[in-house]
Amino acid sequence: MTILVSGKNGQLGHCLVDRLNFSDLDYISLDKKEMDITKYDETARIIGEIKPRVIINTAAYTDVEKSEIDKKDAILANESGPENLSKICKKIDTPLIHISTDYVFDGRSEIPYKPEDDVNPKSFYGMSKLAGEQRIQENCDSYMIIRTSWLFSEYGKNFLKTMLKISKQKKTIDVICDQIGCPTYAGHLADAILKPIKKISENNFDSGIYHYAGDQECSWFEFTNEIFFVANNLGYIEKIPNLNKILAKDFQAKAKRPNYSVLDSSKFCKAFGVNPSNWKESLPDVIKSAVLA
Ligand SMILES: NC(=O)c1ccc[n+]([C@@H]2O[C@H](COP(=O)([O-])OP(=O)(O)OC[C@H]3O[C@@H](n4cnc5c(N)ncnc54)[C@H](OP(=O)(O)O)[C@@H]3O)[C@@H](O)[C@H]2O)c1
């Protein structure tokens, strides 16, 4: 059985490929140049040639701030791309695994969000990702939409890598303290996707929306503290910068984000026998790899 991974150069794409390389699973991974999911004919032809038994779509327009300006590009990648894939998957009777986001929620909840909770995105990125979810639900019968949050890894652009870089440049750093979420190591998400992959490829699962995220909630401020504590212990940061708590309203951001976007991963974890991402435990290895990369 061949697994097809789209968006292979992203954080999650990289983590999936790392794991697939050490597995006995047959796979093909493609980047945007090799398969642009916004182009229906090209994507249908490539998928028709590969004949995958399951498709994992990690491709997306993920810049939350730029999405407020580049609306067309965000919609193309986050709505039209998944729509194309879902139509193709339906035609060839192949399950689609697609990744979505905690930013589909407005953050008014005080308890972790379950997959069936009401959505109400505050940002254009969140709206475009929600539209992608909806197109998949309309167009194909066999799909798994996995919402995740605050992804970090040794690869690509992410909060952890940005903070490590800034720590070398600034003595004091302002960090938001009133947005709460669950950091998720992309490697753990990749493991969680691959564990039930055979079942999914055989259509032996319940189609629907699932959540998979970190096991402990925190604010961006607390996340930064953890990153710097570990990096300092490992000797990658000589002196921890002063951290200054600020409120989201005082941070100049174009996109509005939920103040609370903790995801309840229990449906996914129960169904497939995995644990939520123990992100704190992953920090030393991720920081070591991020610094070496
Ligand atoms: N990052 C987070 O904090 C976060 C949080 C919640 C959910 N998610 C979701 O998790 C998934 C994986 O995120 P990530 O952090 O791994 O993203 P990422 O690092 O930004 O990677 C996304 C990849 O998709 C590619 N791509 C963009 N448009 C494409 C297209 N039209 N066709 C094919 N490939 C395309 C990008 O290529 P180029 O770089 O060449 O454009 C990039 O390699 C996404 O669905 C994202 O929405 C992410």
Image (cartoon, grey):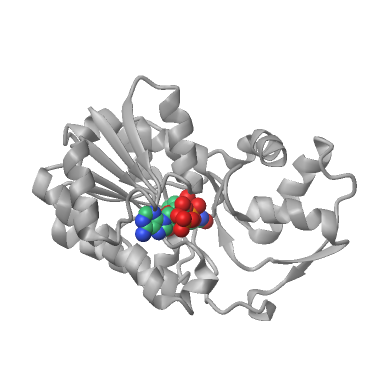
On the image, the x and y values in percent for residue 280 come to: 63, 40
On the image, the x and y values in percent for residue 247 come to: 68, 74
Q: Is residue 72 above or below residue 153?
A: below
- Quarter holding residue 147: bottom left
- Quarter holding residue 106: bottom left
Ligand 1 image position (quadrant): bottom left
Q: Is residue 168 left or right of residue 68?
A: right
Q: Residue at x 51, y 68 (%)?
A: 64
Choose between 260 and 151: the one closer to the eye.
Answer: 151
Q: Residue at x 49, y 62 (%)?
A: 261
- Quarter holding residue 252: bottom right
For the C terminus, the image quarter is top right
Q: Is residue 256 above or below residue 245?
A: below
For the N terminus, the image quarter is top left
Q: Is residue 170 left or right of residue 3?
A: right
Q: Residue at x 46, y 45 (%)?
A: 12
